Amino acid sequence: MHEMSIALDVGRIAEERVGPAAAGNVVTVALEVGADAGVEVENLEFCLDVVLSQPPFGRARALIERRPGDVLRVAYLEVDEPS
């Protein structure tokens, strides 16, 4: 199941982008997934739910935006800044 590998990479990308200390503040990880990307979207959603529910994240959710073509990328991260 390469969707789990993709989900783990997405988690790594998100953690690298915000830094390990802020990873727990990530609330949304948005992905663009193309119809021709060779990804089972439902499986990827499940795998992302598993990865993003574990430390260092814990409360993040995945948002998958379907696109034409073979695109597969992290579109944006939503981070809840502590007050």
Image (cartoon, helix red, strand yellow):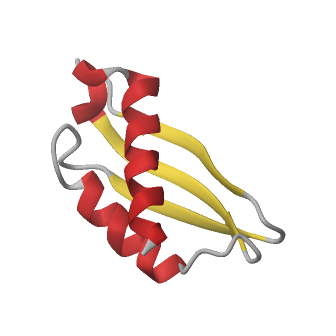
50 or 29: nearer the viewer: 50
* 65 horizontally vs 82: left or right: right
x, y (%) of residue 7? 41, 57
* 75 horizontally vs 41: left or right: right
Q: Residue furthest front?
A: 1
In which quadrant will I find the N terminus? bottom left
* Quarter of the view holding residue 15: top left
x, y (%) of residue 34? 73, 69
Going 34% across and 74% down the picture, which residue do you hit? 46
* 20 horizontally vs 70: left or right: left
44 or 2: nearer the viewer: 2
Q: Residue furthest right?
A: 69
* Quarter of the view holding residue 50: bottom left
Residue 56, above or below 39 = above
Residue 39, above or below 32 = below
In which quadrant will I find the C terminus? top left
* Quarter of the view holding residue 19: top left
Going 46% across and 82% down the picture, which residue do you hit? 42
Total label count?
0
x, y (%) of residue 30? 53, 52
Going 19% across and 37% down the picture, which residue do you hit? 56
* 55 horizontally vs 63: left or right: left
Residue 11, above or below 7 = above
x, y (%) of residue 75? 62, 46
65 or 73: nearer the viewer: 73
